[in-house]
Image (spheres, grey):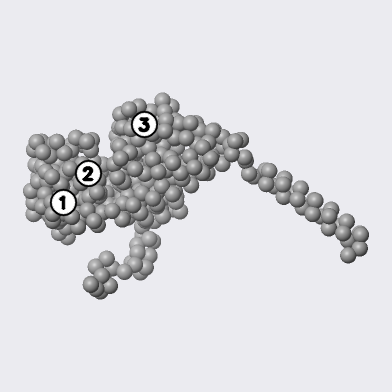
Amino acid sequence: MNNQGLLRRVVMSVVGGAVAAAVLGATVVPADAQERVRWRVPIAFPSALPALGDTAPWVFEQLNIVSGGNIELRISEPGQLVPPFQIMEAVKDRKVQAGFTWIGYDAGKIPALPLISAVPFGMEPWEFTAWWYHAGGKELGQELYEPHNVHPLLCGIISPETAGWFRFEITSLDDVRGLKIRFAGLGGKVMQELGASVTELPGAEIYQALERGAIDAAEFSLPEVDQQLGFDRVAKYNYFPGWHQTFTTMHLLVNKGLWDGLEPQTQALFNMACMAGTMYGLSKAEANQGPVIAGFPDKGVTPVVLPEDILMELERVSTQVLRQEAEKDEMFNKILESQIAFRKNYDLWKQYGYLPRDFPTTLYDRE
């Protein structure tokens, strides 16, 4: 190679390195120069409670790790900083920067919230995430919260709940009339339509109410969660499927003014951590329920599948309740119609893409 050729290669190398350095300098921010976030975040359920409570600590830990310590969210257990039912209002008024909660508790203030927290005969968890992330659900959720100065991040989702723990058998919906039951959300309105006396107790108070006979039955969450709260010691009939909450979401609610002021890189870290938390919570919930149900016989608990005729009547009343709510609230109707439109096409995929749930496989029959 002659001297001129060598000089050309040296110049191009220097220029290329300078361009690369400029590009990297524009896109990569040193850890010590990144935005620092120091928030104290109230949560709606104890962090030691599986499924409902242990997703937030995992998400906050991941955020701290990937940000190199620049994002530090400190958990405030229920009632320490804000009562669980007042988290949204505290975020709205910036009494706290953010909160981690089941947003169905705020349906009295925002009627459409049940559609993105838990819906009777609604979508299955992965179906809901498809709608949320890829069919306009996230944008509708943000629109719903905008007047309240809150930015919602889907940050967890779990499997269907059980249909409830009962102190005695239910043989028909006639047995529901006059029944004293703890129920939440739209499912509670369905039970009221069927003549039940419905009360919404915090999870920590349900065991004592069942034990004293103040209530005859209760729904709360997954078998794993309900077992930890002791329901299996005082109510021996656990009904399935969880028709009233086919999915249960958890959201990180951030004060909107504060969220809008965050740097794009920080927002991206929150978005990615919450999306990971959604998968973390669902996969853990799916993994842990079978062993709990397998242990029912040793505890004298009977798992009962609701007959199809009862499910059909529950679905009929649920549809009636959903339509009534849609007539009363514009955003409820807008979100419901979006979900209905999505499910029409999704049902085609579910019909053709998946094996029937009762498909007889011989793989697990081998010894």
Residue 85 visible, this orientation = yes
Can you identify the residue that label 1 sits on?
238
User: Which of the two residues, 343 or 248, is positioned nearer the viewer here?
Assistant: 248
- CA–CA distance between discs 2 and 3? 21 Å
Q: Position of residue 296 (x, y in %)?
A: 16, 54
Residue 341 visible, this orientation = no
- Give SS at disc 2: helix
Mark 1 or 3, which is nearer the eye? 3
Q: Position of residue 240 (x, y in %)?
A: 19, 54
User: Which of the two residues, 302 or 315, is positioned nearer the viewer here?
Assistant: 302
Residue 110, located in which quarter of the rendered image?
Answer: top left
Q: Position of residue 117 (x, y in %)?
A: 33, 44
- Give SS at disc 1: strand
User: Which of the two residues, 143 or 97, is positioned nearer the viewer here?
Assistant: 97
Can you identify the residue that label 2 sits on?
228
Question: In this image, 363 relative to 198: left or right?
Answer: right
Mark 2 or 1, which is nearer the eye? 2
Quarter holding the N terminus is bottom right
- Give SS at disc 3: strand
User: Which of the two residues, 257 or 147, is positioned nearer the viewer here?
Assistant: 257
Q: Bin the neighbour count of mark 2 within 10 Å (Cα to Cα): few under 14, some 14-19, many 20 and up.
A: few
Precedes in sequence: disc 1 or disc 3: 3
Quarter holding the C terminus is bottom left
- Residue at the spot x=67%, y=43% of the render? 26
Q: Is residue 4 above or below residue 179?
A: below
- CA–CA distance between discs 2 and 1? 14 Å
Disc number at residue 76? 3
- Residue at the spot x=32%, y=36% of the render? 44
Q: Is residue 65 above or below residue 149?
A: below
